[in-house]
Amino acid sequence: MTRLRTHRESHVFSRIGWLRAAVLGANDGIVSTSSLIVGVAASEASRTSVLIAGAAALVAGAMSMAAGEYVSVSSQSDTEKADVARERSELLLQPEAELRELAEIYQRRGVAPETAEAVARQMMARDPLAAHARDELGISEASTARPLQAAFTSALTFTAGAAAPLLAVALAPSRILIAAVALVSLACLVLLGMLGARAGRAPLAPSVVRVTFWGALAMAVTAGVGHLFGTAVG
């Protein structure tokens, strides 16, 4: 008796929209807020001033991320819709030319001319607009722009990322405040790199090294600027 085996594949490409926004938001929340806090603290400002600066950075950054992502992804969505509308018009006015175009796309991908034309006819008979959107324009359900999803994800993850260094300011003794913020932030960046790599099923080490290196560099630079500014003012 023949046993049928189902070959199941699991891909994560459909996550790319929200995953990109989530990693960007969390990374920006950690790096920008911790860098600001370290810079202000290095200028010998009081804990209250550092907390106020950090809280303001959290709120302003979350709103900025949400607005920026929404505008950016909306522009992408508008472009996609305009391309699809043009394609719809071309399908109505020049169906045979669009059929040949689709067949040529399949030929360039290695399909024999006769087979490519047969496949193109089948795809055009089923859903011509979807076929051209996917194979000519590279637009699919998995990759289409979602402005609200990107905006909400970025704002939420920015807030979560920014909360960590801000909490360190509130709890750490004043004498080790900068060190505590730096260590907490770097630990969060390591965790973010691990989670991002795990969610995207990507190699772990490059993701972790990338986020921690740039985060550490940003904090070091702002700490130096804050120290110089505090010395100059003093």
Image: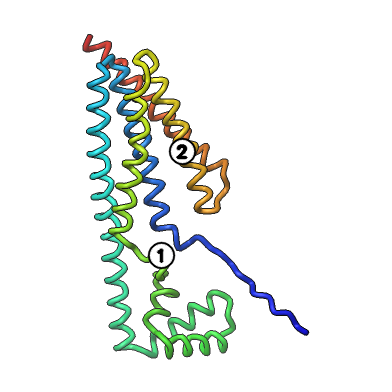
Considering the numbered disc 2 on the image, is that residue within a helix, a strand or a loop? helix
Q: Position of residue 201 (x, y in %)?
A: 55, 53
Q: Name which residue type carries label 2.
A: Val
Q: Position of residue 191 (x, y in %)?
A: 49, 39
Q: Which residue is mark 2?
A: 211
Considering the numbered disc 1 on the image, is that residue within a helix, a strand or a loop? loop
Do callouts 2 and 1 mark residues in contact (Cβ within 8 Å)? no
Where is 201 relative to 11, above or below?
A: above
| 2 or 1: tag closer to the N-terminus | 1
Q: Where's the C terminus, which quadrant?
A: top left
Q: Check the image and name the residue furthest to the right.
A: 1
Q: Where's the N terminus, which quadrant?
A: bottom right
Q: Quadrant of residue 145?
A: bottom left
Q: What separation in Å lies between label 2 and label 1 (alpha carbons)?
A: 25 Å
Q: Which residue is mark 1?
A: 143
The local crowd at label 2, few if under 14, some if 14 to 19, many if 20 or more residues have their Cα within 10 Å, is many
The local crowd at label 1, few if under 14, some if 14 to 19, many if 20 or more residues have their Cα within 10 Å, is some
